[in-house]
Amino acid sequence: MRSSPSRQAELAELFAKPFAHRGLHGGGIVENSPSAFRAAIAAGHGIELDVQASADGEAIVFHDYELDRLAGRSGRLAEFDAATISAVLLTGTDETIPSLAQTLALIDGKAPLLIEVKSPGRHVDTLSRAVERAIRGYKGPVAVMSFNPEIGRWFADNAPEVLRGLVVTEAGKKWRGWLTRRLALWRSKADFLAYDIRDLPSRFASAQRAKGLKVTTWTCRSDAHRATAAAHADQIIYEVPA
């Protein structure tokens, strides 16, 4: 979609730095943790993080739907209320699972921020509203993005001032994938694409980029990935190799 000059300026500020995938983690720093976000800020980079809804509809910063890998306990995050989740320690740390509001207070505009909203299906209102409440009035470059085009549509309809992106992977999708991607882009009214590095170069991504749509790419983990991104994208979402 074509953007106004002011929106293009916001996108340029957002895409000014590479994004640390789930914060700058590794070496004992857990992904999507306060320490990972502080490390990204210290490196002078942007931050990509994930949010999903607690049982009582709060936006929680956590990637997996299950708690076991990152928090060492059974159950799905969505089964617990925010108060319970706030007391759960991230594995091997003294840090608890943060809310989006807590994380925004920590980042405080010191790094460009991509918020991946994890809400599959068509019922996206609860989490979208929680995210919008959290970022309302936030001072700093920020955007929401999702694999689910309904997230973009919700923000286009309810908070159109918020920058929004469509996350795309072509894995396992053949000829019907092109049509699906076009429909998802139309539905989401995205300002940018976040594209799977394994799919670049992509005819679809290149065509949208030629029309002026920004493209960032995930997850860059090697020099080869960075070279591909430099040729076919505007910015990277990266992890430091182990």
Image: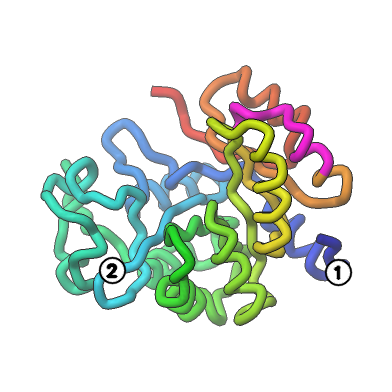
Quadrant containing the C terminus in the rendered view = top left
> Horizontal placement of 89 versus 5: left or right?
left
Secondary structure mostly seen in the magenta stretch: helix
State the image coordinates of residue 30 (x, y, percent, origin top left): 30, 42
User: What residue is rendered at 66% in x and 39% in y?
Assistant: 176
Q: Is residue 44 above or below residue 241?
A: below
User: Gap between marks 2 and 1, in whole Å?
Assistant: 35 Å
State the image coordinates of residue 184 (x, y, percent, origin top left): 65, 55
Foreground residue among 14 and 60: 60
Number of marks present in the image shown: 2
Q: Nearer the viewer, mark 2 or mark 1?
A: 2
Q: Quadrant of residue 19?
A: top right
Q: Is residue 238 magenta?
A: no
Q: Which residue matches tag 1?
A: 4
The magenta region covers 197-207
Q: Is residue 201 magenta?
A: yes
User: What residue is rendered at 39% in x and 72% in y?
Assistant: 101
**Label 2's element?**
loop
Three-letter code for the amino acid on which mark 1 is drawn: Ser
Quadrant containing the N terminus in the rendered view = bottom right
Foreground residue among 205 and 137: 205
Query: Which mark is drawn over residue 54?
Result: 2
Three-letter code for the amino acid on which mark 2 is drawn: Ser
State the image coordinates of residue 98 (x, y, percent, origin top left): 30, 62
User: What residue is rendered at 45% in x and 53% in y?
Assistant: 49
> Horizontal placement of 206 versus 43: left or right?
right
User: What residue is rendered at 45% in x and 67% in y?
Assistant: 104
